[in-house]
Amino acid sequence: MAYDTYLAERINRILTDQKANFYEKKMFGGVCFMVNEKMCCGVMKDQVMARINPAIYSEALTKREPQK
């Protein structure tokens, strides 16, 4: 599996609903969503990667993944 297409479709739907100016770009074996010519988020295999504010980067690293 290159990337989870269902997850990518969900992100596409959210960005469309928000009326964001975006496009999809295939890269690194996954798909990235470019907003205003910058990578906003993407899907690699079955995981989401997201651009975050550098001011909260250290705090974000301490957050744990929710238990299933």
Image: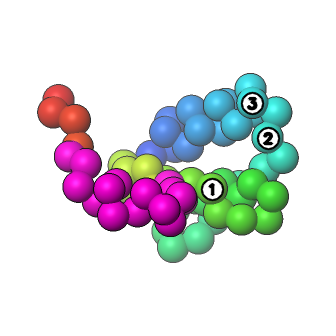
Q: Which residues are magenta?
A: 50-64
Residues at badges 1 and 2 in contact (C-beta under 8 Å)?
A: yes
| The N terminus lies in quadrant | bottom left
- Magenta stretch secondary structure, dominant: helix
Q: CA distance from mark 3 to mark 2?
A: 5 Å
Magenta-span inclusion, residue 61: yes
Q: Residue at x 53, y 58 (%)?
A: 53
Question: Viewer-proximal residue, 47 or 61?
Answer: 61
Where is 35 relative to 66, above or below?
below
Amino acid type, label 1? Cys
Name the residue that disc number 2 marks: 20
| The C terminus lies in quadrant | top left
Residue 3 visible in this rendered orientation of the protein: no
Q: Answer with mark 1 or mark 2, whichever residue precedes in sequence.
A: 2
Q: CA distance from mark 1 to mark 2?
A: 11 Å
Amino acid type, label 2? Ala
Name the residue that disc number 1 marks: 40
Q: Secondary structure at mark 1?
A: strand
Q: Answer with mark 1 or mark 3, whichever residue precedes in sequence.
A: 3
Q: Secondary structure at mark 2?
A: loop
Question: Percent x, y for residue 67?
Answer: 15, 33
- The image's colour scheme reads rainbow
Q: Residues within 10 Å of mark 1 (few under 14, many from 20)?
A: some
Q: Residues within 10 Å of mark 3 (few under 14, many from 20)?
A: few
Q: Is residue 2 left or right of residue 64?
A: right
Residue 17 visible in this rendered orientation of the protein: yes
Question: Percent x, y for residue 59?
Answer: 32, 56
Name the residue that disc number 3 marks: 18
Q: Residues within 10 Å of mark 2 (few under 14, many from 20)?
A: few
Question: Percent x, y for residue 35?
Answer: 75, 54
Q: Residue at x 59, y 38 (%)?
A: 11
